[in-house]
Every structure is written in structure tokens, then in C-alpha cells.
Amino acid sequence: MMNIEEFTKNLEAEFEDIEPGTITPTTNYRDIKGWSSMYALIIIAFVDTHFDVALNADDLKSTQTIQDLYQIIIAKKQL
Amino acid sequence: MALFKTNHVKITGISACVPKEKLYTRDYAHFNEAEKDLFIKSVGILERRVASKEITTSDMCFASAEKLISSLNWNKQEIDCLIFVSQSADFFLPATSILLQHRLGLSKHAMAFDMNLGCSGYIYGLQILSNLISTGQIKKGLLLVGDKSSLSTHIEDKSTYPLFGDAGTATALEYDTNSNPVYFNLQSDGSGEEAIKILDGGARNEVRDDTFEIKEIEPGIKRSRRHLQLNGIDIFNFALKEVAPNVNEVLQFAGIEKSNIDYYIFHQANRLINESVRKKLKILEIEKVPYSIDLYGNTSSASIPLTIVVKLKEQLKNQHKKTLLSGFGVGYSWGSCIIDLDNIVCLDLIEI
């Protein structure tokens, strides 16, 4: 399973027109340049494909940073 | 469980009709440039077809059916069943299928009825008509499937307006004792009713004073209670959770290996959803999973036959291919089917 650094790097690649290294684990993902609700779906697809974990609307509402997302994935993975 | 093995029925031909008029994602004024790029890349829609005011779903299905009947050289008097699957009927009543029976000049001995389903509708329609024909008591039937979804979306709703295209299709089914069995797995979950819904205008919420009032639901989303509402995250999660297991179940039920399927034709929901489902199913050969969403958008129940017509016409000519079809969406309602397409007549796309 990918660690938080790999997760951040791989998720960063899903965003358009972002300089590599711009996003860190403490970045609030809704503040990423060009953020739109479409990215919520892109994150859900990314997490589903790489972790086989389903993030729902409440999971997204309860998270702010990349680190928060990672924590919720770990928690769900261990269920 | 609604698992079926249906014998003695085959698809003889498929045709599809779309409006001439194209709308381009690039021209959608309520997206900024970055949103356009992202929408094209993730949802996968470059352009779609939208019907003018005077064209209905039944007009597109009529054009598809008329041409298909003549190409097959079918005697109209021998068509014993017509099913119209749509959520954009001509009238509240009578059922559009009955109007089409008359308009197509079918016999008064033909049975005709409507089925009110969206994105899963093609699979459900195929199941019902296949089962009727498999008894051998009727020999030929028409499945007319499609939607004019553009009727229900509001131009200032970014979550729906750029997504849907209009189309109407016709599929001819016939009794055939030499055909391979057709397998179905049909499912429903009404707990998802809010995910895709038109609130007003039916018996539960009759048209009222504010039914047509355009309200801002959230930034970028304005619509009335008569327009389609769509919760992208909920639908996405539904599709990720339910579609792959449904497909795996029908494969297991049929005793057919994934590697023996020549084409997987999915409802064209959204490229991101479909690609996630493809990866979940571990279908690595991308040429086995054709897309029509790039040029036609999400065409509701018409998406599966439309994809066959625009993407597989040449590949199916004089061929015998094993296909897995899967539709999923509004309801929630979903289902898959394994059916052989053996030397079928697949017409060129009709534009009206």
C-alpha cells in the first residue's frame, strides 16, 4: 500500500496544470488551483482504483487535507 | 434473485437515430476554460446531439424502427410485440408504444406497452421481450428505447446540462431455436431515489405555483422542481459499488469466462465511472470496451444500442460475437446481460 508521500504525489498527478511538489499532505485539497466539484469524483475514482475503498459524500465533507483523506482511507481499509 | 437464462431468442438487427444538431462542450457558456478541459478529460464528452422542440423520443425511435423493418424485409403483420422504454414519453397517457404501433402500421394483434426506466432500460427491455419471444408464441418483436433527456435539464445547471444527449433506437428480436441462451441479472434499489429525480409533475408532487421557478441550489447549479436533479457523488458511489458485482454474477451464472467476452458495452454514464468499472472488472483490453460518450454524451437508455451502432457496426458484420451489456442508473436500477450478436444487421446511424 502506498505511503502518505506516494499518495500525495500520485493524487497530485490527477490535478491539471499543477507544478510538481505544490501539493503536500497538509494541503487543503479544496484550495488546490482549479478545484471544482468534478475533482471530488476524480478523488473517489482514484481511491477506488488504488485502494478499493469507497469514499462517500460524508467522508469528503469531514476531510480538509490530503492527510485527512489518507487517514480515512486507512481507517476504511482496516474495517 | 432476478437471474435468467432465456432460450430460443436472438437479436436480428439494431438501428439508432440522433438529432442532427450538435452542441459542443467548448461552447458551453457556464463552464470556464479550466472546467471545459476537466469535463472533456474526465467525463469524456466533446459534443452531443440535442433534439429541437418538435422532435420527441418516439420520433427518433420511429425513424430507427421504420428503417430497420425495411432493411430486415420484415412483414409488419408478423411483428407481435412492441415495447417502448423511455422516461420521455409523448404524453402522460396513452402509452407511446401504442401510438408507435399505429404509426408504424403494425397489426392490431400486436401487443404494445411502455416501460418507464432510464439508464438500465435497454437491459430490462431486452429481458422482457426475450422472455416473451422465448415461449415461441410470438416470433418477432421490436424494442424501441431512448430518451430526450435535454427536455429535463436546465442550461444553468452545470451538473446535468452538459452531460446528456438525445437518441432513439430500435432493436429487432426474433424466435430462433438455434440461438445460444441469453443470460440476465437484474437489480433495483429504490433507496437511491433522490440521486436522479424530477421532483414535480407526477402524482406525488403535482405541478404547483413554484414548480417552474428557477432557484439557485448551489453555485453553478440553477434549476426548477420540474428539471432533473443529479447527485454526482451518490451515483458515482452506487456505480462503483454495484456494477462490477452484478457483471461478475451474470458471468458466473452463465459459466462464461471473462476472456470469452468479445465486447463489454456499458451504459455511457461518464468516462470516469466507466473506466473505474472497467478497472474493477480487470478488463485490460480497452478495445473490448467501446465508448460513444465522446460524440453523443450520456444518452440514457439508448446508450448501449447507440454504442453498438456507432462503434461496432463493422466489427459485427458477418461475425458472431459474444457481448456483455450493462446498464445502470436512475432508480437505482441496474442489470447486465450476456448475449451473442450473430450476423446481426446493424444500420448506419440515422440523423433527423
Image (cartoon, rainbow, N blue to C red):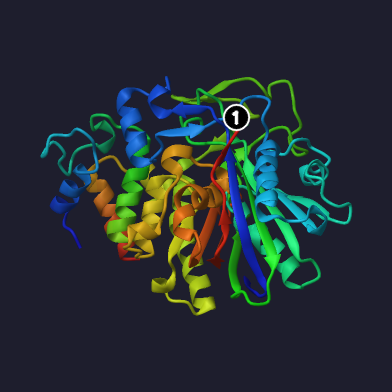
Res. B177 image quadrant: bottom right
- The residue lying at 42 percent from left, 73 percent from top is B260
Q: Residue at x 66, y 63 (%)?
A: B127
Q: Observer-nearest residue: A69 or A19?
A: A19
Q: Nearer the viewer, residue B241 or B173?
A: B173
Left/right of residue B207 with respect to residue B121 in the rendered view: right
Q: Give the quadrant of the N terminus of chain B.
A: bottom right
- Position of B130 relative to B112 (above/below): below
Query: Residue B179 sits in which quadrant?
Result: bottom right
- Left or right of A30, for residue B71: right
> Toward the viewer: B233 or B165?
B165
Residue type for callout 1: Ala
The residue most toward the right is: B108
Residue drawn 53% across the image and 77% down it: B254
Q: Residue at x 44, y 62 (%)?
A: B263
Q: Is residue B324 above or below residue A60?
A: below
Query: Position of A74 compared to A79: left or right?
Result: left
- Residue B257: image location, x then y, percent: 43, 76
Quarter of the figure with the C terminus of chain B? top right
Q: Do we see residue B217 in this rendering?
A: yes
Secondary structure category for the residue under label 1: loop
**Chain under disc 1:** B
Tell me which corner region of the image, top left, top right, bottom left or bottom right, holds residue B98: top right
